[in-house]
Image (tube, grey):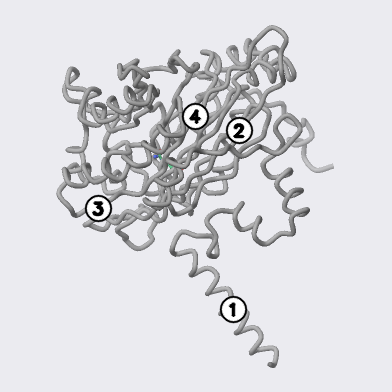
Amino acid sequence: MDKIEEEIAAHNGNLEESSSTKDGSICGYESLHHLLSVNLKPHLYKEVSRLLIGLNCGKPLELIALPEAAKALSSKHDFDLQAFSFDADKELLREPQVVRVGLIQNSVALPTTAPLLDQKKAIFQKLKPIIDSAGASGVNILCLQEAWMMPFAFCTREKRWCEFAEPVDGESTRFLQEYARKYNMVIISPILERDVNHGETLWNTAIIIGNHGNIIGKHRKNHIPRVGDFNESTYYMEGNTGHPVFETAYGKIAVNICYGRHHPMNWLAFGLNGAEIVFNPSATVGELSEPMWPIEARNAAIANSYFVGSINRVGTETFPNPFTSGDGKPQHADFGHFYGSSHFSAPDASCTPSLSRYKDGLLISDMDLNLCRQLKDKWGFRMTARYELYADMLARYLKPDFEPQVISDPLLHKKSL
Ligand SMILES: NC(=O)NCCC(=O)O
């Protein structure tokens, strides 16, 4: 083979590799961790894992053995099922506070051209075995993905999708309330909300259902994206619920919905209100955000001494009418690939491997909430934070006559010597 032939062969090889990602896999592998575990020698994989996902209490995360019933549901319904355990150090005065937490990622069940009610019902059907698997595994707190009861239609800017919106006590909530009661489970249900008492306005809302099936409260998405195809401001406004933390039977939880993860102060505010676990139900695509995905939540967990559960949709959702991204590129009828990769991050900088990049999945993790205070004591971020400096800076910044505090090198403005 001469040099040119070699180059052509290499080019074709590259094409083959990249085309295999059309199914959502990474060159045929479900996730980065899967790719590494298959291709690295065990001692190298161990070392790469240590650097990539950290150690918890000085050791790799342990796997949890799940009941056969939970595993059988994952085999039968072909969803990824993984389970890990975050430890904390033993304390002399406090018992461990271990909770079992679950995250569900899923693709939609029917094409977006199907009748809306059928689409919603089919998603309910699809979720049933995954929720049952969480229930069989003894999950205490379960979180679903952003706007789980509909396709993520906000790219289209078409108002017909508003019909998916439901009041807080609507059919999606009623569907999940039964499971909350059945499995004594807290469930976080992020939906497109219609607020009937306030002029039928729409919101992007997470409803917190208590383990007795009661509605504890709701949080509305604080930050609305205006990036790429994420034209969500066409549908709803910035949330008006602040940064609530919900005290549940299993711990203090909060929800930072999707695009809010790019705003460190949003994460901070949930932490200041005392959250021990913050969920980040999301819908985001590879081309836009994948390099950010493993970093932002993990950083928030470290900076705020709490656990984070990150969830992303899976699959490609194609819409009847093409739309543009306002970037001069051709019109298209889908967002691109929602890359799943849901995972947990812990305050000690460790995190779980991610769920599949293309399959539905349930990720379960035991977490000893004592780890939150242990990391606060160790690093003292709350004590060293200098909030008064930031409060002062923000107060000045918000004034119309704000001037940035910039000290210029006086030589910059002198004529050349
Ligand atoms: N749903 C949503 O807020 N998506 C925005 C895209 C991103 O933040 O990656």
Does the beta carbon at disc 2 come under 8 Å from ligand 1? no
> Element type at marker 3?
loop
Q: Mark 4 points at which residue?
A: 101
Q: Residue furthest bottom?
A: 1
Sequence order check: which comes first, mark 3 or mark 2?
Answer: 2
Q: Is residue 49 above or below residue 23?
A: above
Front residue of 282 and 127:
127
Sequence order check: which comes first, mark 4 or mark 2?
Answer: 2
Label 4 crowd bin: few (<14), some (14–19), many (20+), radius 10 Å: many
Position in image of residue 403 (x %, y %) = 58, 22
Q: Name the residue under label 2.
A: 85
Residue 192 located left or right of residue 414: left
In front: label 4 or label 1: 4
Residue type at tag 2: Ser
In terms of image quadrants, where is residue 382?
top right
Quadrant containing the N terminus in the rendered view: bottom right
> Element type at marker 1?
helix
Q: Mark 1 points at which residue?
A: 11
In front: label 2 or label 1: 2
Q: In this view, does 56 lie above or below 254?
A: below
> Element type at marker 2?
strand
Q: Residue at x 55, y 70 (%)?
A: 17
> Element type at marker 4?
strand
Between the residue at mark 4 and the residue at mark 1, the CA separation in whole angstroms equals 45 Å
Sequence order check: which comes first, mark 3 or mark 1?
Answer: 1
Residue type at tag 4: Val
